[in-house]
Each structure stands twice: as C-alpha cells, then as structure tokens.
Amino acid sequence: MAPEFFEFNGFTAQIKRTKRIKSATITVEEGHVCVVVPLLLENERISKLLKDKNCWIKEKLALHREAQPKSTKQFVSGESFSYLGRNYRLKVHQGNYQPAKLSQGRFVITLQGGSENPELIQDSLQSWYKKNANTKLKQKAKRYAKIIEVECASVGIKTYRNRWGSCSAEGDITFNWKIVMAPNRIVDYVVVHELCHLIHHDHSPKFWSEVERIMPDYAECKDWLKQHGEGLEV
C-alpha cells in the first residue's frame, strides 16, 4: 500500500492503515507524526482526529524543535543539501503533499503551500535523511563487523548534539543520522570507530591501534569531523 499523508494545519502526518486495530492511535516521535487507523476509516474521521489532537501534536513538535540545534538553512528551492558528501539542490513544488525524495540529482518535496512553510520542508527532509541513514549505516555496520570480526546486538540511529555514535556495554550501537551528510569515507570511519568499541570500551592506545588496522587514514577522517562536523545540519 502506497504511503498516505495528511498535510494539516502546519504539520504533516503519515497515515498507516491496518486490519489489526479497531481504534486510531497517534504517535509523535523525533518530529514525525504517525497515525495508525483501521483499514477503512474515512478521511473525514482522520481529519477530525487530527483536529481534536492538534494542540497536543503541536506541543510535541515544538518540544522536539526546541531540542534541536538551530539550523542556518532557509529550506527554499535552489538550496543545497549534502548526502554522502555530494551536494543536491532542493526543489519545492506546490500541490498535494509528497514527502522528500532524491530524484534526478535533486531533493524534491511537494507541499500545498510550496515554500511558505519551511518547518514542514525541514521535517520532510529530516525524515528522508533518517530513513536512509538507518538503511545505509546498518549496511556499513554489517560489512565492517565481518572485517573486524565482531558482532553487535543492534544498530540504530538517534539525534545527538555532540557525538556521532555510541556503543553500549550490551553491544547496541547507535549513530547520529546526520553523519550520512559527510563524505563516504568519513561515514565509514564513524562506523569502524563504534565497532572497535566492541573490543575496547575506551579510547586507549589499543583501541586506536585497532581502528588504524582497519582504517590507516583514520586520523584524517577524525580531523575532518573536527573541522566540518558542525556544518552537517538539516
């Protein structure tokens, strides 16, 4: 079933229909509004539900935005956004909502108000980055785990302010989704860095020796992040 979206009073909600429930539920996580509804629920009922929960949803979204670093982006057509080190220009169309996608070398988003609501454009772009970061980082972690000969319990993404990844004592690894804006080699370095923590849970000389064994140029990657990391933003 094709994704379904409602553009509603300053935010966009993804609608998921299922036979397995009899009543609708709304979740707001990481700035993403999701409404799970019975398979045949009418659109009018969904609109009423969003209207009834409008204040609660906007409060949740506001809290999420307040917790994020302020972006210097304007979210207008022609602006560039990076993915794996390559810049892609944004094109905003006016029409029924279509989420961000990478098409023919551009980020394309369609909104009823066009460029009038930069927050909706930002949310849509962030959703695209998070989805693709989750896929790409899991692929890279799987590949490098075989090379390093380690196993991680899980791989996921989070929004971090001051770190690019984390490795728990239980072997759960999480990455800052914004890292996929960096060049491919830098992304690889962050993945290798966290996987090596499965062997050494510190930053001892032994840890860095293991990182260097896999990536002899790791120091250059580390320096790149120090110099350019703050510029990786959406």
Image (cartoon, rainbow, N blue to C red):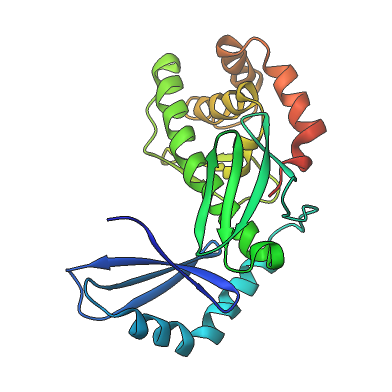
Please count the marks in the image.
Answer: 0
Residue furthest out toward the left: 19
Q: Residue at x 29, y 80 (%)?
A: 42
Please state, as top left, top right, bottom left or bottom right, where the N terminus lies in the image: bottom left
**What residue is shown at x 73% (from left), y 54% (from top)?**
76
Above or below 217: residue 77: below
Question: 9 and 21: which one is in front?
Answer: 9
Q: Residue at x 47, y 29 (%)?
A: 198
The answer to whether residue 137 is above or below residue 130 is above
Q: In which quarter of the image is residue 192?
A: top right
At 56% across and 71% down in the image, what residue appears? 11
- Image quadrant of residue 18? bottom left
Left or right: 128 as drawn, with respect to 146: right
Q: Is residue 31 above or below residue 55?
A: above
For this view, does 105 lie left or right of residue 2?
Answer: right
Return the x and y of residue 151 as percentages of the image width and height. 37, 28
